[in-house]
Image (cartoon, rainbow, N blue to C red):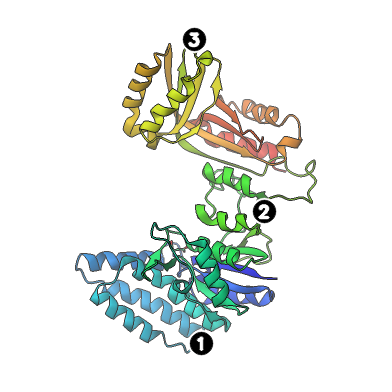
Amino acid sequence: MIKVCKFGGSSMADATQYKKVKDIIDRDPGRTVVVVSAAGKRFSQDHKITDLLYLCHAHLTYGVSCDSIYEMIRERYLSIRDDLGLTLDLEKDFDDLRAEMDAGISQDKLVSRGEYFSAKLMAAYLGYEFIDAEMWLRFKLDGSVDQEASYTALKHAAGSSKCVIPGFYGAMPDGHIRTMTRGGSDITGALAAAALDADVYENWTDVSGILMADPRIVKDAATINRVTYNELRELSYIGAQVLHEATIFPVREKNIPLNIRNTNDPDHPGTMIREAFEDEDVTKGNLITGIAGKKGFTIVTITKSGMSNEISSLRRILEIFEKYNVIISYAPSGIDCYSVVVENKLLEPARYQILADIQKEMKPDHIHVSENIAIVAVVGRKMVFRSGSSGKIFQALGENGVNIRMISQGPEELNIIIGVKEKDFNTAVSALYERFVQ
Ligand code: ASP
């Protein structure tokens, strides 16, 4: 059994958190590969080391002294080391880094050092081998990850040893360090799990998994125990912030379950994400898996009598949005009527050109623009097996005075998407939660 465990910034923030990580690792002999983030915040006003490193580089770029920021970073890692009673010589590493900064260091190399120092410390503390990400995680020239080369290199480097790997960065073909986008350690963990054909990828963070609804709207929202990759995609597409977007692809490809866990509550089973849950009784339990949503949408509705009989009408409408680089979130249709749901921030820069083009190209009877729309997605793999799901959703909204402006159901009945006025957004989410979550 191999478990690849990734620990996020809050799990690496100080020595107390390191001790919790060690307890978690010691509880299960399968936890042999550990991927770590840079030290995160210890309290809400604190700074993330990665933010400080970016700041340091900005100072260097403008020729302003970064001494005090650099000292905060150095001090943070040295105090973790001392508090853990380790004797690792980090001073030398920091001196080398300082010399490199003075000589001109790339931004990627500098910001990658947060993960580097975290991993060095964690490896020493656990008594695991340190395997630098630059030794195995390879990028192609276009910046995408070279999965094949990376997987082979990690298998070779890790063998059957117990190791700690820094997240967030790898090496370009010429050996230069390249970082991922923010939160990228999630991806490193997923790549390591895929490379080593792990039995599970555990992503340890500071929440006990994914919640069934936004806790800012639904107080004490329950945790999702099980969610499929498809459901997760639906939930994160419309606003649920869980993992870095690109995390799931490597593990999904290899059918490796992904378990989100809480370092501060290690007994909680968290959320398990898999391709399918064959053993479950679809007629039992909550009908829905989760509710997600966000504000900031506009619905453009184009009506023209006879339009549904024209072969190219929908394509011509979609092409206008494509011309202005506006991604279409949903496109529900009626007879002689097409609606296009788009995010305001994408529509705004080209709004008037798009409307003018539609007018010119389609000569519609009517164009209607509904603004201030929020989208709510009710996601649940069990909906397809149970009759009356949509009816119950609409009833819950109707009873709470929420006027529905748009409805769209995914082809596999995995989700029901509802457009409501922004002012009704919180009421809609709360009403659905109350109705469906026991
Ligand atoms: N330390 C990086 C960040 O703050 C990467 C990570 O933690 O995943 O974005």
Name which quarter of the figure residue 64 lies in.
bottom left
Q: Is mark 1 within 8 Å of ligand 1?
A: no
Query: Which of 413 and 18 lies nearest the eye of the viewer?
Result: 413
Q: Which mark is residue 305?
A: 3
Image location of residue 327, percent across then percent down: 44, 36
Instruction: Judge left or right: residue 333 versus residue 82.
Output: right
Q: CA distance from mark 1 to mark 2?
A: 40 Å
Badge 1 or badge 3: first in the primary sequence: 1
Name the amino acid, label 2.
Answer: Arg
Q: Nearer the viewer, mark 1 or mark 3?
A: 3
Quadrant of the image for the N terminus? bottom right
Residue placed at 47% from the left, 75% from the top?
A: 132
Badge 1 or badge 2: first in the primary sequence: 1
Residue placed at 57% from the left, 81% from the top?
A: 128
Name the amino acid, label 3.
Answer: Ser
Residue position marked by numbered label 1 in the rendering: 85
